[in-house]
Image (cartoon, rainbow, N blue to C red):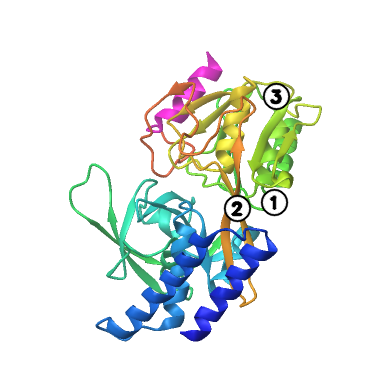
Amino acid sequence: MKKIFALLLISFFYTTVVNGNTNDDNLYKKIDLFVEVLEKIRKEYVDEVDQSELIDDAINGALQSLDPYSAYMDSDLFESMETDTKGEFGGLGIEIGMEAGVVKVVSPIDDTPAAKAGIKAGDYIVKINGKQVQGKSLMEAVKLMRGPVGTTIDLTIRRKGVKKAINKTIKREIIEVKSVESKILKEKIGYLRLKAFNNNSSKQLTDIIKNIEKKEKTIGYILDLRNNPGGLLTQAINVTDFFLNEGEIVSTRGRKINENRRFFARKGDKVKGKPLIVLINNGSASASEIVAGALKDHKRAIILGSRTYGKGSVQSIIPLRNGGGIRITISKYYLPSGKSISEVGITPDIFVNDDSDDFEIDSKTDSQLNYALKLLTT
C-alpha cells in the first residue's frame, strides 16, 4: 500500500508542480482519501482482494465515468483490439456500448455469428456465460465475449417490448468483414450495402461503382448503411467525398488545438449527380452517421429509415507503459450544419419503420428498401 501511495504522490507532484496547479489542496486530499479507502478494503472487506486488480478497476472507473466509450485495456485486450480495424478478427461480430451501466448492442455486423443468431441493435446483454454484466466495464464485457475460434458463448438478452429474457448460444468465428455488397436492382438502380468502415471500404466502394458505371446505365443509387456500426473516420470522409462535388464533410472539435479539424470534399461527384437515397436505422452509428449527415446537410441524398444511434465522438487508443492502453474520447463530430451527432443521431428525411432483420436484397418485406425503389422509379 505504501508503494501505491508513493506512486500517487509522484502523479500528484507531476500534476500540480510540473503543470503549474500548485494551489489545488483538494486534489491532495482526494488522493489521500483514495489511499485510505484502499487500505480499508484491504483490512476490512469480507474476502481477500487482489490489490492490483482493484487499482485496474479504479482506473477503469475513472475512464468510464467520462462517457460510455472511454475505458482501460490490459495488455491482452489491447493487443486484440488493435486488429479490429484491419477487416479480420475473432469474435461474434458485434459492436457494443454502455448505457446506464448496462452493455447495449450498437449493431451486429452482417453475416457474422451475432447477426445470424438474431442479435439486434438496441438489445441489452445482461449475462455472459451466466455471469451478470451490470457493474462491469465495457472492456471487461468485451474480454468476456472474446475467446478461441470455434468455442461457444451464452448470452442472455433483454429486448424492448419483450417481457422474457432471450438466451442465445453463439459460436465464435474469425470475422472477415467484406465491407461492400452490391447489385443492380430493377430499373437500373445501383444498390450498395456498406457493412462497416474498415481500412479498405472506400476502395471497395470505388471499384464497385466504377465497374457498375462501365456496364450499366444506372438512373440512381441506394446506399444502405443500416446496422453499420461505423469504423475509421478517414473511410467515412472518403465515402462521402465520392458523392459530393464540394463542401465540408465533417469537423472535429476537442480540447487540443490539433483535434479541431475540418474535412472537405474534393471537386467531382463520381456518380455525376445521379439521385441517391441513403438507408439508415438505429444500428447506424459513428462513421455511418457522418456519411448520412453530410449528404443530408448538402441535400445530396434523401435519408430514409429511422433515427440513427447517436455516437458522434472520436476515440483514440493510447498505449501505456505496462503494455496495455486506454481508449479515450478526444473530440466530437460536427456536421456541416454545425450540429453535433452525439446522443442525437441523424433524423431521416422520410421515416419508414425498420422491420427487417437480415436486409436481404431481394426481400419483398423490406419496407425501407422497397420505399426507396419506389421513390427512384416514379
Q: Please, what secondary structure does the residue beneath circle 1 have?
A: loop
Q: Amino acid at mark 2?
A: Lys
Q: Is disc 1 in contact with disc 2, using a CB cutoff of under 8 Å?
A: no
Q: Earlier in the sequence, mark 3 or mark 2?
A: 2
Q: Is disc 3 in contact with disc 2, using a CB cutoff of under 8 Å?
A: no
**In the rendering, at what x and y percent does residue 196 appear?**
57, 48
The circle drawn on residue 217 is: 3
User: As drawn, is 133 to the left or to the right of 359?
Assistant: left
Mark 2: few/some/many CA within 10 Å (<14, 14-19, 20+): some
Residue at image x 56%, y 46%? 230
Residue at the top extreme of this rendering: 378
Tag 1 residue: 200
Q: Please, what secondary structure does the residue beneath circle 3 have?
A: loop
Q: Quadrant of residue 250?
A: top right
Which stretch appears magenta? 364-378
Q: Is residue 7 visible?
A: yes
Residue at image x 64%, y 40%? 253
Residues at marks 3 and 2, CA–CA distance in whole angstroms:
26 Å
Q: Nearer the viewer, residue 306 or 10?
A: 10
Q: Earlier in the sequence, mark 1 or mark 2?
A: 2
Q: Is residue 76 above or below residue 104?
A: below
**In the rendering, at what x and y percent does residue 316 appear?**
63, 56
Q: Nearer the viewer, residue 146 or 274?
A: 146
**In the rendering, at what x and y percent does residue 347 appear?**
47, 27
Q: Nearer the viewer, residue 177 or 11?
A: 11
Q: Nearer the viewer, residue 17 or 377?
A: 17
How many labels were placed on the picture? 3
